[in-house]
Amino acid sequence: MGRATGHVKFENVAFSYEDRSPALRQVDLDAKPGQVTAILGAPGSGKTTVVSLLPRFYDVTSGKITIDGSDIRDFTLQSLRHNVGIVHQDVYLFSASIRDNISYGVVGATQEDVERAAKVAQLHDQIMSLPGGYDTWVGERGTTLSGGQRQRLSIARTILIDPPVLILDDSTSSVDVETERQIHRAMTEVMKGRTTFVIAHRLSTVREADQILVLDKGVIAERGPHAELVRTGGIYQSIYELQLRPQEEVLLEAAVPAYGRAAL
Ligand SMILES: Nc1ncnc2c1ncn2[C@@H]1O[C@H](COP(=O)(O)OP(=O)(O)OP(=O)(O)O)[C@@H](O)[C@H]1O
């Protein structure tokens, strides 16, 4: 199969890790090409499991997953992995130049291609400030990249591969405000035009998502857009009050200086 348009469907999917009790049950979802699906839920509710089934790290126990109507078990693994990209939080770096680390997996990528991807991933300027630029050796015994830089390198790699379906996690480890801003911009860029599944921790992600799925003990307990779910008084509303809304207050504090706030 060539490049899919990225219409992803889960049909009555159940999954159990070996002989343990089901980690997922009766999961139905429909993600249209280019749509963003935010996945939320308590620890252990099944978020990682849902996204692990798409690149077939595990196969469904029952039900099926399709991309553009074809069962993903009918793709070759190579074709599937070119259609389903994953942005890693902490990507593995090969002992090689930063250029080769970005172009890993893409045959025939040129310097221009790599630079364009690095620019979109908000990484180009920092690469240029390294003594060897794109030839800088990273990985074992090479220059160390920060967590935020490795995350953006993973984004640059994904941009080069250009998969129609994307999986990512929007949490960022403790980074300064400027790095966080760059990561956020890079994530927004890489999601454009791709059917995206994001394990979501940020208010901005869930508010802009086309659909939110809330998992509870392996089942989809709630689904819909932010504006709808926030009114229903369920699990999403409590996640919003406890985890998401406080971020809004922090952002507001950062945007409005203390002396300005008094006048509000
Ligand atoms: N490799 C594994 N082998 C066996 N059980 C697993 C494995 N990975 C996850 N589980 C179990 O499956 C269930 C769902 O886990 P999963 O990691 O998908 O949840 P999650 O919502 O992503 O959690 P978190 O927010 O902590 O990452 C949990 O009960 C977990 O213990």
Image (cartoon, helix red, strand yellow):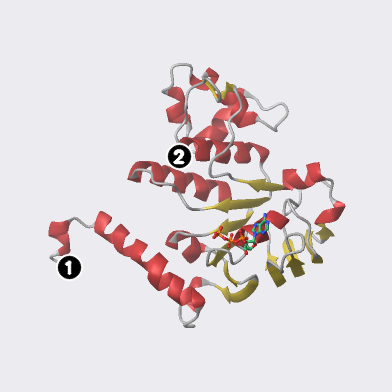
The spot of residue 221 in percent (x, y) is: 60, 77
Nearer-N-terminus badge (1/2): 2
- Residue type, mark 1 in image: Leu
Outermost residue, bottom side = 232
Front-lying residue, 117 or 103: 103
Image location (x, y in percent) of residue 6: 71, 55
Nearer to us in this view, 247 or 188 = 247
**Dot 2 corresponds to which residue?**
148
User: Looking at the picture, does residue 245 appear above or below residue 100?
Assistant: below
- Residue that mark 1 sits on: 264
Furthest-front residue in view? 19
Describe residue 5's horizontal placement relative to residue 95 as left or right. Answer: right
Placement of the C terminus among the 4 image quadrants: bottom left
Q: Are marks 1 and 2 in contact (CB under 8 Å)?
A: no
Query: In the image, what residue occupies the spot 71% across and 68% down?
Result: 22
Label 2 sits on a secondary structure element that is: helix
The residue mark sitting in front, 1 or 2, is 2
Res 71 visible: yes
Seen in the image, is 126 located left or right of residue 209? left
The correct choice, above or below, for 213 with respect to 183 in the image is below
Between 121 and 247, which is closer to the camera in this rendering?
247
Element type at marker 1?
loop
